[in-house]
Amino acid sequence: MSELPGLVLPAYFSYFKSPVKMVRSPDGGIAAWRLSRKTGGWLPADDIVGEILGAVGGEISSLTLDSFIQWTEHDRGRYLQGEGPVFALYETVRAIVETAEAEGRRLTSTELALVRGIRRKTFVMFEEQLQQAGDAAADPLLGAEDQGSR
């Protein structure tokens, strides 16, 4: 798909409650990638570019980079299971959130900052693993960019 006027890439979206990122493809067009809740990796989603760009609203919305990272890590932490440091951090986030829910309250500002910080860290860690495994859409630098180090 070719470039659309006014679209700044990369761009991030929620598509029916699933994170989607659009990036510049090697040929100068648009490549879209949707999060796989089965693997945590990225699935080609070029077939939904037109739908997303033509129908933002309702079940499709634009996301900031930080919101995209938070949503991606929310889903990875919720739908994936495994061993290792990333999954230990997902368990930490789950424990913080479940404690607040059990107490019938929202996260405190300190808890919220902790959860957001952990998710930024797990995003980079998970994306690095995906990149090493050959996932063409993996980009651990997005997490570093979100923290202002890029």
Image (cartoon, helix red, strand yellow):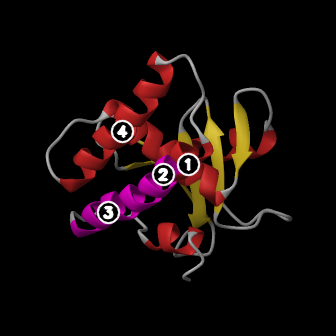
Of callouts 1 and 3, the N-terminal one = 1
Callout 1: SS: helix
Q: Which residue is mark 4?
A: 77
Residue under the point 23% across and 69% down = 132
Magenta residues span 114-132
Q: Which residue is mark 1?
A: 110
Say which of marks 2 and 1 sits in front.
1
Callout 3: SS: helix
Q: CA distance from mark 2 to mark 3?
A: 16 Å
Say which of marks 1 and 3 sits in front.
1
Q: Which residue is mark 3?
A: 125
- Image coordinates of residue 42 in percent, x first then y, are 40, 50
- Image coordinates of residue 51 in percent, x first then y, are 70, 38
For residue 114, the mark is 2
- Image coordinates of residue 96 in percent, x first then y, are 41, 35
Whether residue 45 is visible, yes or no, is no
